[in-house]
Amino acid sequence: MDGSLLVILSGRDRPGVTASLFDELRAFPVTVLDLEQLVVRGRLVLAALLGLRAQDVSDVRAAVHSVAARLGMEAETVPGAPEEAESGRRRVHITVLGAPLRPGAVAELAAEIARRGGNIDRIRRIAAYPVTAVVFEGSGLDVLELRRILSARARDMGVDIAVQAAGLTRRGQRLVVMDVDSTLIQDEVIDLLAGLAGAGDEVARITDAAMRGDMDFAEALRARVALLEGLPESALREVAGRIRLTPGARTLCRTLKRLGFHVCLVSGGFTEVIAELSEELGVDRLRANSLEIVDGVLTGRVTGSVVDRAGKRRALEEFAAEFGVPLSRTIAIGDGANDLDMLEAAGLGVAFNAKPSVEAAADAAVTVPYLDSVLFLLGVTREEVESADAADGIVAASRAEPPSH
């Protein structure tokens, strides 16, 4: 073949457009080098890159325009359009979540990509609710640099943005480790227990001290648990019945399990309160603190090692080793400073409705109140979620999940 010809058909979508074009082209000695089709709201764009001899260009162009005329579509042919070399191009996926997604955010994102010499190769929407999620597939960009810049600007742009290198690692992640309090659930379990013990104000004071850095997590945990001394074991069951799942939590866990992911929970809270919920969600492993109970009463002490900031990272690493998953193919989700080491160690660290310092340190931030939005960062579309749910007789995911469970 002497050269190439880029053929583009556009117009109202209907059955048989692709068949008509290629049936016409079968009469010529051409080869198909590349092919892409897109349908948006009933409008079709079909692009084909053909390899052909120089003497056939005029005849092929005439055939393409003839097909377009019969179909009532527009045709464009660009001779000599070379196929772009893929070797050495740094490809990147930029996922944007908006509730709603405004034109200004798209404009600023596209401008930022252009300023860095990158190119947007493809844009596709993967979800319309509970957020609008759009993936920009680009090339010629440095992932870490773009992530740093867009993370700093995302809040002002009114969107959440995740920047990830394209390739098998992004599609092959197989372990998700989640924090529990204020991530998987909307509550802080220690606060609920403190309320039953009449120690809510004192527990809040200690929590504030820990957040200021005046106490480390383990010290603060033991001080707060000490205030629960004398609480009956039945209080744990009462609190377990009161905790509220974050909207989208069931959908996230259910979909991840269908995809073959391992799902694990790590919590600075208490096994006795969240074990039943963990089992209900089909979680593979749970690591949390344990309360000492003697004669049906809390002693005000924890048993075993404390699951603190370092403990959460250690749990991620141990779960990854157990399931044979490289750390580069793990995902960690959390909201507090206690999750920072875990988020740093994971291949993708996601800050979910997190404190500013955590948001700044994470690879991606989700600020909408729907935990299943994390699926869109993995390239899973809303249509895929709903199709899988429909096959199991489950009503459409996030629309069916109430704010509390």
Image: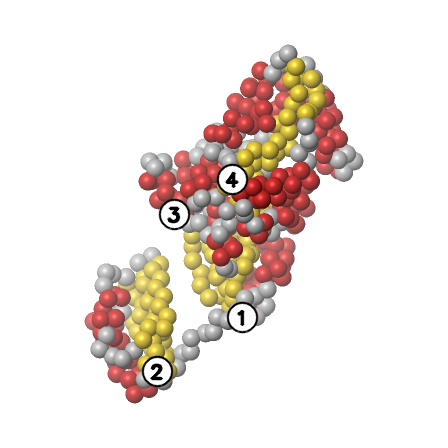
Q: Residue furthest top?
A: 295
How many numbered marks does the figure carry?
A: 4
Quadrant in which residue 313 is drawn: top right
Q: How far across and down, in percent of the image, does residue 125 sit?
A: 43, 55
Precedes in sequence: disc 2 or disc 3: 2
- Mark number, residue 88: 1
Instruction: Write the residue at 34% across / 37% down.
Output: 392
Q: Residue furthest bottom?
A: 55
SS for tag 3? helix
In this rendering, the label closer to the viewer, 3 or 1? 1
Q: How far across and down, in percent of the image, does residue 21 sit?
A: 25, 70
Residue 158 visible somewhere in the drawing:
no
Horizontal arrangement in the rendering, residue 106 relative to residue 69 (left or right): right
Look at the picture and state if 129 lies above or below 227. Answer: below
Q: Residues within 10 Å of mark 2 (few under 14, many from 20)?
A: few
Q: Amino acid at mark 1?
A: Gly
Q: Which residue is mark 4?
A: 263
Q: Which residue is mark 2?
A: 1
CB-based contact (under 8 Å), mark 1 and mark 4: no
Structural distance between the alpha carbons of marks 4 and 3: 19 Å
CB-based contact (under 8 Å), mark 4 and mark 2: no
- Mark number, residue 384: 3
Instruction: Write the residue at 23% across / 63% down.
Output: 16
Structural distance between the alpha carbons of marks 2 and 3: 40 Å
Instruction: Write the residue at 54% across / 27% down.
Output: 275
Precedes in sequence: disc 4 or disc 2: 2
